[in-house]
Amino acid sequence: RRRRPLSTTSNRSNALCVCLSIRTVLRHPNHRPQGGLLRRLTAQSGQLQLHPSDLTDAEWERIEPLLSTRAHRGRRPTTDLREVLNAIRYMARSGGGWRMLPKDFPPWQTVYWWFRRFVRRMLFRTIHDIALMIDRERSGREASPSAGVMDSQTIKAPAAGAARGFDGARKITGRKRHIAVDTDGRLLKVNLAPADISDSAGAGEILDAIRNRWPWVKNLFADGAYSRTRLMDKAAFQDFIIEVVRRISHKAVLKRSLRTRRSYPVDLHQQ
């Protein structure tokens, strides 16, 4: 009988040791690994993503330069920011609470502190805007959009932790999301509000945000619910042109309003 090469046997032994180490860490009731310990163990075993929502190496290489640099004074931070972003992505995908984070992530207090810091520094907005401009350039368009589509959606939502209202047009009690996308369906701005806020009133806040974030946007397409004198006057004052698309118009024009449906989530009540 031919003996197996020593290298193969040693590799299997190393993989077995890594698997036993991961199992020991996961089963320990009072141990919460710090600094991405499980990440290093899974990387040694060839499994780079512990959860489906984790950042890939390519995504992390693009996001890491956008993070804040180390301070020149004070002690060095010991928290792995990649693990913090993985925890935030896990929260966004699973819809769980802060205290329900798995133990392979940093403590939920640490993750929440960094989440508030990222929000104040507008990190997520920066990542979104950069990704949008890169995607537009890949499709052969200018980086900054010049036209967009406005629409709204109302769904039922639980009362806990969120203000609700009654949408008389759709006969729904819940929340409404006012949204603006470019002509290809990429998200430009979203605003969550109670369902009793009319489309024209919610569009006023959308116009203010678009003028600040996307100054090159000139034309906006909308349906008949946005044909209000107050909204039109505000749009003209901010140098917007709102083109109201009627149902009697050509069907090819109505397809623009359908592109906003690409950005609607299934579970809006979790936002």
Image (cartoon, rainbow, N blue to C red):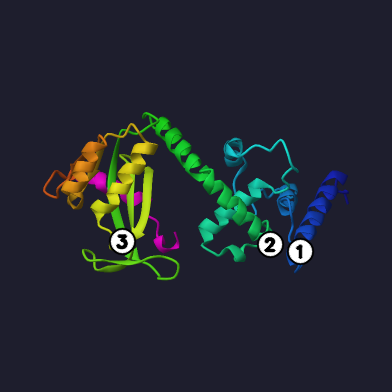
Residue drawn at the location 45% of the way across and 67% of the way down:
161
* Residue 185 visible from this viewpoint: no
> Which quadrant of the view contains residue 67?
top right
* Percent x, y of residue 172: 28, 68
**Residue identified by numbered label 3:** 154
Classify 10 Å Cα crowding around label 1: few (below 14), some (14-19), many (20 and above). Answer: few
Secondary structure at numbered mark 3: strand
Residue range of the region highlighted in magenta in the rendering = 253-271
Which of the two discs, 2 and 3, labels the residue nearer the N terminus? 2
* Residue 26 visible from this viewpoint: yes
Residue 112 to residue 156: above or below: above
C-alpha gap between disc 3 and disc 1: 44 Å
* Percent x, y of residue 220: 25, 40
Instruction: Please state which amino acid type lies under the numbered disc 3.
Output: Thr
Q: Nearer the viewer, residue 260 or 113?
A: 113
* Percent x, y of residue 33: 74, 57
Instruction: Please state which amino acid type lies under the numbered disc 2.
Output: Lys
Residue drawn at the location 65% of the way across and 46% of the way down:
81
C-alpha gap between disc 2 and disc 3: 36 Å
* Percent x, y of residue 11: 81, 48
Residue 214 to residue 93: above or below: above
Q: Which mark is residue 31?
A: 1
Instruction: Please state which amino acid type lies under the numbered disc 1.
Output: His
